[in-house]
């Protein structure tokens, strides 16, 4: 019988306080045997007070100098969620603070010149209500492109992805180096693409109303930016479906315009996925969780949050970022309450390093108690040769 490609996993961070859980994590390969992990830990959703999320959320910066076999915390920042990237040898971190009216507020940027040991004072890039975790970014024409969710449409179902653009020729800690596209809310899900409506269990009426609106309109989550042969695209998870939202970005250097293009089948499109480009293989690679039986997923999501295929972490590859082939299963849980989800990855030579928000002994698949590291050796060998010989 086949086994997962990257188990046993290494625990990067363990949260033992059941009032909190591990959010979507980030990962950077710093070179040689050095890795940097970004692990947000926030109050559980059972806590009704947004103010607690604003006051008590923390992001832990964790370092490994032995290829991911062992990890130690090197610093801590007061962010609800945080996303790292590298530029000119420095580590930068997009930081989202917890909000008191909306779930999240302004987007900040901090910089570290010593691989995460110390950090600059934050620069507020944009005021508003924004969120994302570590998803795919693009660097092109000396600009960095990354997408976030605009939460300010007045309803938690209606989120609009927008693209943040940084001019890499300028000082990134100067807010004038940054621009933002227009946000684009989901246009609604065609009936034929929707899962069956929620049914079966008596649950809180507010959850049923939320689920009903989510079912009708869809809900964008965790957008990725990809460069498809010169075309900038944004791929969004869409709750309650097996598709992703596909949006196109045009940018003339001054004005950036984002527009909805289509829905397209996506393995794991119902939950956060991470898409990035590998120049060596000439292909896109994605980590994602495949959808389970729709009706079981719906009932469990409301009552127990055992949902969305979070127990299987899969790896896929693609030539165009839309049509995907399965490379294999990275990790699989041993019992239903466990999960490996919200993964992000970084390349280390022939290997792929993957960080996951993982529940090992926590209360449910969603409220994870760990961040785990998975090394996938010679990952390119898992793909078929899809490129014509020359």
Image (cartoon, grey):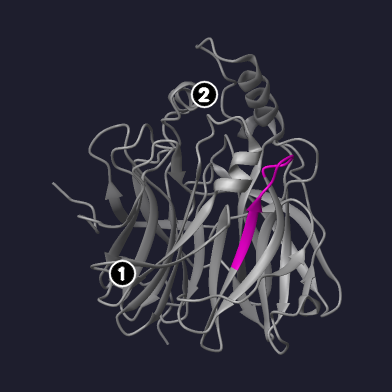
What x and y, as percent, mark residue 217?
A: 72, 33
Which is more toward the observer, 186 or 158?
158
Q: Secondary structure at mark 1?
A: helix
Q: Secondary structure at mark 2?
A: helix
**Residue corresponding to mark 1:** 379
The image shows residue 42, relative to residue 137, as above or below, that is above
How many angstroms separate mark 2 from mark 1 (CA)?
36 Å
For disc 1, the neighbor class at 10 Å (few under 14, some 14 to 19, many from 20) is some
Q: Quadrant of the C terminus?
A: bottom left
Q: Is residue 39 left or right of residue 354?
A: right
- Asked whether residue 102 is drawn in magenta, I would say yes
Q: Is residue 324 left or right of residue 239?
A: left
What x and y, as percent, mark residue 294?
A: 48, 28
The image shows residue 332, relative to residue 162, as above or below, that is above
Residue at coordinates 30% horizontally, 66% vertically from top-left? 71
**Residue corresponding to mark 2:** 302
Q: Quadrant of residue 353?
A: bottom left
Which is more toward the observer, 17 or 65?
17
Residue at coordinates 38% horizontally, 60% vertically from top-left? 355
Give the farthest residue toward the left. 1
Magenta range: 94-103
């Amino acid at each position: 019988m086949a086994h997962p490609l990257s188990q046993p996993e290494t625990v990067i961070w363990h949260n033992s306080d059941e009032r909190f859980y591990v959010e979507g994590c980030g990962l950077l390969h710093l070179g040689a045997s050095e890795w940097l992990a970004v692990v947000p830990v926030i109050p559980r959703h059972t806590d009704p007070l947004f103010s607690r999320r604003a006051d008590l959320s923390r992001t832990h910066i964790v370092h490994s100098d032995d290829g991911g076999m062992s990890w130690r915390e090197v610093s801590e920042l007061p962010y609800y969620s945080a996303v790292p990237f590298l530029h000119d040898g420095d580590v930068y971190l997009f930081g989202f603070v917890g909000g008191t009216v909306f779930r999240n507020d302004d987007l900040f940027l901090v910089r570290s010149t010593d691989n995460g040991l110390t950090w600059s004072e934050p620069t507020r890039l944009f005021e508003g209500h924004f969120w994302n975790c570590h998803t795919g970014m693009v660097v092109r024409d000396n600009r960095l492109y990354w997408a976030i969710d605009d939460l300010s449409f007045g309803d938690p179902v209606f989120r609009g992805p927008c693209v943040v653009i940084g001019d890499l020729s300028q000082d990134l800690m100067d807010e004038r180096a940054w621009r933002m596209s227009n946000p684009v809310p989901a246009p609604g899900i065609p009936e034929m693409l929707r899962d069956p409506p929620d049914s079966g269990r008596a649950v809180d009426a507010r959850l049923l109303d939320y689920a009903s609106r989510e079912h009708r309109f869809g809900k964008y989550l965790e957008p990725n930016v990809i460069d498809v042969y010169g075309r900038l695209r944004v791929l969004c998870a869409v709750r309650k479906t097996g598709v992703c939202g596909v949006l196109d970005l045009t940018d003339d250097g001054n004005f950036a315009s984002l527009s909805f293009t289509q829905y397209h089948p996506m393995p794991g499109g119902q939950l956060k996925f991470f898409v990035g480009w590998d120049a060596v293989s000439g292909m896109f690679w994605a980590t994602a969780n495949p959808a389970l039986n729709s009706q079981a997923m719906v009932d469990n999501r409301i009552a127990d949050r055992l949902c969305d295929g979070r127990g299987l972490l899969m790896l896929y590859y693609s030539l165009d970022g839309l049509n995907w082939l399965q490379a294999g299963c990275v990790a699989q849980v041993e019992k239903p309450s466990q999960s490996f989800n919200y993964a992000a990855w970084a390349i280390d030579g022939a290997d792929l390093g993957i960080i996951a928000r993982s529940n090992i002994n926590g209360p449910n698949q969603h409220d994870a108690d760990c961040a785990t590291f998975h090394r996938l050796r010679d990952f390119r060998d898992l793909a078929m040769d899809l490129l014509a010989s020359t």
